[in-house]
Image (cartoon, rainbow, N blue to C red):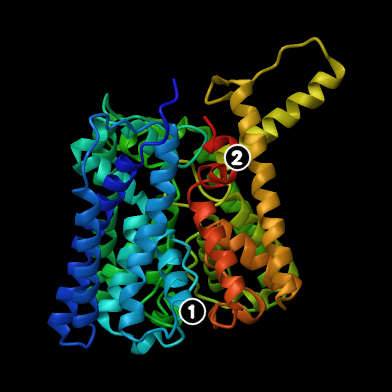
Amino acid sequence: MYYGINYKSITRVIGALLCIESIFMLIPLFTAMIYGESDMMPFLQTFAITICAGGIMVYIPRENNGRIGKREGFLIVSLSWISISAAGALPLLLNGNVDNYTDAYFEAMSGFTTTGMTILDNIDSTTHGILLWRSLMQWMGGMGIILFTLAILPMLNSGGGIQLFSAEATGIAFDKLGPRISQTSKKLWGIYVAITLIMIIMLIAGPMSVFDAICTAFSATSTGGYSTRQASIASWNSAYVDYVVTAFMFISGMNFALIYRSAFRGYKNLFHDEELKWYLITTITATLLISVTLIMSSFYGDDIEKSVRGSLFTVVSALTSTGFATENFCNWGTFAFIIICLCMFIGGCAGSTAGGAKIIRLVVLLKNTANEFFRQLHPNAIKPVRLNGKVISYDLVFKVLAFIVVYIIVTGCSTMILALLGLSAEEAIGASLSGIGNCGFGFGRMNPDSTFIMLHPIGKWVLIFDMLVGRLEIFTVLILFSPYFWKK
């Protein structure tokens, strides 16, 4: 029986998320106090606004039925990401980093969805509090603020936690690491925190300061891409930093449930995962293709190591949708542009912090295509798609096909709108793929040496929509626009 959408439960959960976000805002507030910078008051004002709004929403009268079903789950996840981005934009606006709310919201949505597109062109002179908040937004959004809430708030686990988890999780299915969703959430966040701490230590061992190491680790493990320097990772001009960041971007593009199982239940799990094998093959192949191109064109002269390092860093950054840059890859030519765009489309592994269509979906798609060729010769044969030795249901295969089709349609529509707003084909295609893939790379006038500030306001809202749709894996957001979602 359909009882109607439980708006009170939706409001209470979003209110709880805003309260949690306000607590995280205290971290850059204290940072501003330590450095004695001007953004103390903006963070204090934002903290007060956010916690008051969240508190009012949490303490509204509660219905006896605290039900959270599928409809409520989709609405909570979509509206919560919109709401936390709206609050996260306030410090940028109040501190004067931007002069309009569109730019502030663009930066915040880009942060929470771990896209990494930025409109700030004065990062080197930006205050420590704002720099930390940008990286912190990405770190919260990387593993998912809903997932964090499920780990610490028992009220959600007793009322629809599974709906929220499945609506925010990435990939074709989610892995449970315990009998309760809260246990799975805690274990995933535990791995996430551990990887972040290890990376911070390794970066401090290099040429980075403690502050830069913390912010860079937050951005890398969340595959977000915000940096404390305008020139991104290239600013340190260090092979050590390049390799460390590359390694952790790659790790963060892996399935975190697989990492957990390998760490606590035997490393052999890594060698038997089919998606991880394709992830590694894709990385190596794309790196070799671009490296050969750079070496043959003598782009870096006779420095083969720099050609390979630059190619590897860029490929992993694109494939994991991180968006860090050590080079202006727009100067590498058309072939490299195509490879980078393909990497942005492919994305990382399911259950990771990476964006894109996800390798596991493309593996299923390729296997189903191969089976269709077989069925042309043997029409009566039953040949199911198998992944890691297990049969994939036809319903799941059809869902993957639908996802890829809608992914391409949304990208195509965004490309046409951006082209109408004056962007070149390269700029429009690159920005659309980057937005929906949560990558952050830009091409043409929005190359790694520049920002997205030149975009028309309508173009920024198009990319904001793309970022949200891409982070929540298409259907979670688009289903809200279907008429049957609202019907009994």
Q: Is residue 29 above or below residue 37?
A: above
Q: Residue furthest top?
A: 380
Q: Are marks 1 and 2 in contact (CB under 8 Å)?
A: no
Is residue 351 visible in this depiction of the protein?
A: no
Counting from the top left corner in percent of width and height, residue 19 is at 22, 56
Which one is earlier in the sequence, the residue at label 1 or at label 2? 1
Mark 1 lies on a secondary structure that is loop
Q: Is residue 336 above or below residue 400?
A: below
Counting from the top left corner in percent of width and height, residue 41 is at 19, 82
Counting from the top left corner in percent of width and height, residue 65 is at 27, 29
> Where on the picture, by quarter, is residue 292?
bottom right
Q: Amino acid at mark 1?
A: Ile
Mark 2 lies on a secondary structure that is helix
Tag count: 2
**Which tag is nearer the camera, tag 1 or tag 2?**
2
Residue wearing tag 2? 483
- Position of 488 with respect to 405 (left or right) is left
Counting from the top left corner in percent of width and height, residue 320 is at 50, 55
Residue wearing tag 1? 119
- Position of 400 with respect to 63 (left or right) is right
Name the residue located 59 percent from the left edge and 83 percent from the top edge. 454
Q: Is residue 243 above or below residue 237?
A: above
> Where on the picture, by quarter, is residue 308?
bottom right
Quarter of the rendering occupied by the N terminus = top left
Q: Amino acid at mark 2?
A: Pro
Q: CA distance from mark 1 to mark 2?
A: 35 Å
Give the numbered dot on residue 449: none
Name the residue located 35 percent from the left edge and 50 percent from the top edge. 143
Is residue 381 visible in this depiction of the protein?
A: yes
Q: Crowding near pointer 1: few (<14 within 10 Å), some, many (20+)? A: many
- Position of 117 with respect to 423 (left or right) is left
> Where on the picture, by quarter, is residue 457?
bottom right
